[in-house]
Amino acid sequence: DEDSVLEGFRRAGREELSAVAIVNGKTGRLDGQLSATDLKGLDVTTIRQVEQPAIKYLAQHNPQSLNPVIVYKGDDLRWCVNQLLNLHLHRVWVVDPELRPVGVVTMTDVIS
């Protein structure tokens, strides 16, 4: 949550991911997600804002990324896929009972 947006995208690039989880450094809870969608609206005058901590940046630029859709570990895959389809999502985050991320299910996963 304190890493910069730029560092988040570096990590996503190294791991060939389309998004990364924003995890609270104190609690380990899922606090948001960072994806290419969060770069919309940046231009030459605002590009340096990617040096901000991800939480601060998202609060200003795309607050809905601070409320990612979750499913719980052990939830039915059919229900998970319905969430993806009905909400027109690219991904849902899988969390444990303490809301700590343990995985992600993407539409690419479902198609595969």
Image (cartoon, rainbow, N blue to C red):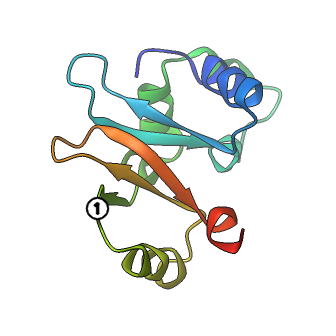
Q: Nearer the viewer, residue 40 or 25?
A: 25
Q: Which residue is mark 1?
A: 74
Q: Residue at x 66, y 23 (%)?
A: 11
Please name the amino acid that badge 1 sits on: Gly
Where's residue 84, x and y in %?
A: 51, 74
Q: Specify whether residue 46 is in view.
A: no
* Quadrant of the frame with the C terminus: bottom right
Q: Is residue 65 left or right of residue 26?
A: right
Where 12 sits versus 80, above or below?
above
Where 47 sits versus 69, above or below?
above
Q: Residue at x 54, y 82 (%)?
A: 85
Q: Nearer the viewer, residue 33 or 16?
A: 16
Q: Residue at x 38, y 52 (%)?
A: 94
Q: Specify whether residue 104 is in view.
A: yes
Q: Residue at x 62, y 71 (%)?
A: 110
Where's residue 106, x and y in %?
A: 59, 61
* Quadrant of the frame with the N terminus: top left
Toward the right, the furthest residue is 44
Toward the left, the furthest residue is 98
Where's residue 111, x and y in %?
A: 70, 73
Dot 1, how many residues are within 10 Å of its Cα: few (below 14), some (14-19), or many (20+)? Answer: few
